[in-house]
Image: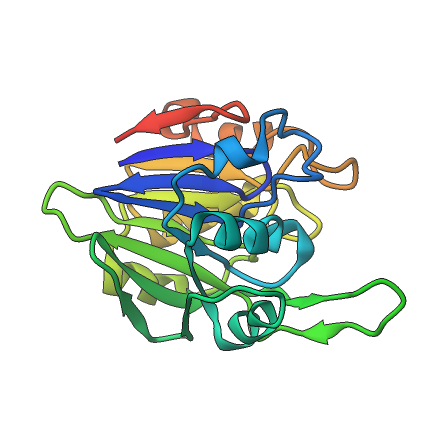
Amino acid sequence: MKITWFGHAAYRVETGASVLMIDPFLTGNPVFKGDAAEAAAGATHVLLTHGHDDHVGDSVDICKREGATLIANFEICMYLAGKGVEKLDPGNFGGELQHDDFTVAMVPAWHSSSTIPEGQAPIYLGNPGGLVIIPKKETGRTLYHMGDTSIFSDMALINELYAPDIGIVPVGDRFTMGGAQAALACTRFFEFSTILPCHYGTFPIINQTPDAFVEAMGADKVTVLDPGGSLDL
């Protein structure tokens, strides 16, 4: 499995013959300095945790250009179908979606989810969630992208059900957990061997570094990637 971070909550995950773009906020992402089309080249799937614009990002363009399948909750799938996305695989909490190289389990997150078209009222886009990605090859490692969330006690059930080994954890505060709360979530509820912090440094209103999280967790337990950086696991 190869994981590449593009800043904010945007990741590319390569497992088997599949290329997953998670929350692909590329165009307009202040810390992403690459080419959006190049970053998503070969994408087979686009996975979304919730409907905020800084997570939906380039999803429609990627799905149209690459012929990728959109994996998201029902409301997001129907909304983006109206934008021209053709391949859809909708799901919701408690469900698991089967694909050739991986299974996706949709799990809760404590946040909100909508889009606000210019000059219009917000459009509800279902409940926000997290994504547990379970590679089907025996050597694969289960990954949990928490989405945007606060800490919540049912994280214990997520660990009991799926025992994720890799955690992608929001740490920027204000709209998600801050460093101390995120560290408590990781240590109380999970036994991650690899932890990747995200959702920081993108906008002035959130924390600019993951330092508070790294300090609370211990530097040896956290892998901090630069935007565009990759990790082979």
In this rendering, the count of numbered labels is 0
- How far across and how far down the image is residue 210, in percent? 58, 31
Q: Residue furthest left?
A: 138
Answer above or below: position of 159 versus 81: above
Q: Quadrant of residue 28?
A: top right
Instruction: Give how far across and how far down residue 51 sits, in percent.
Output: 61, 63
- 171 to the left or right of 21: right
Q: Which residue is pictured at 43% across the width and 44% down the height?
A: 168
In terms of image quadrants, where is residue 172?
top right
Q: Is residue 193 above or below residue 65?
A: above
Give the residue at the far right of this rendering: 119
Seen at 55% across and 75% down, the residue is: 78
- Residue 159 left/right relative to 11: left
Q: Quadrant of the N terminus?
A: top left
Residue drawn at x 32%, y 67% is 157
Quarter the C terminus occupies: top left
> Residue 109, percent across and down?
51, 64
Q: Nearer the viewer, residue 67 or 201?
A: 67
In this rendering, position of residue 201 left or right of residue 226:
right
The residue sitting at 57% across, 56% down in the picture is 60
Relative to 224, is 129 above or below?
A: below
Q: Residue 224, image x and y in percent?
A: 47, 26
Q: Which colour style is shown? A: rainbow
